[in-house]
Amino acid sequence: MIRIKGRNGPFTFHHHYAEVMDCAGAEPPAPLAYVEIFSNSPHTRSAPVTFSGPPREVVKLLRKIARELETATRANSGANVKTKKEGKA
């Protein structure tokens, strides 16, 4: 379960919506990545959390977050492994 803090307080992640579209009014037309993160509230009509930007920057941010979490996970899991002298975990 993923918990997120949105505009109206914390909620449990339910689903997301992501798309790339042309930015209206931009000359020349520029693509814009748009991400919405939803709760499972039946009253939700708009996403409590949204972000947008150039697709490459959005992907770069998401990859950076993933790398940081993977690094932290590896570092934390290594602390729980016992050596042969200590016995198996």
Image: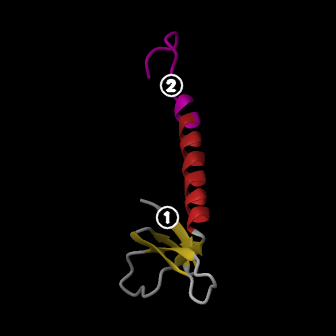
> Quick one: SS at disc 2?
loop
In this view, 45 is above or below 34: below
* The disc label shown at residue 3, or none: 1
Point out the image quarter for the C terminus: top left
Which amino acid type is shown beneath numbered disc 1? Answer: Arg
Dominant SS of magenta comes to loop
Label 2 crowding class (10 Å Cα cut-off): few <14, some 14-19, many 20+?
few
x and y, in percent, of residue 3 in the image: 49, 64
Cα–Cα span, label 1 and label 2: 28 Å
Q: Residues within 10 Å of mark 1 (few under 14, many from 20)?
A: few
Residue 14: x and y, percent? 39, 69
Element carrying mark 1: strand
Q: Position of residue 52 (x, y in %)?
A: 58, 74
> What residue sits right under mark 2 in the picture?
81
Comparing 18 with 8, the one in front is 18
Residue range of the region highlighted in magenta in the rendering: 75-89
Residue lying at the far left of the rendered structure: 42
Say whether residue 25 is left or right of residue 13: right
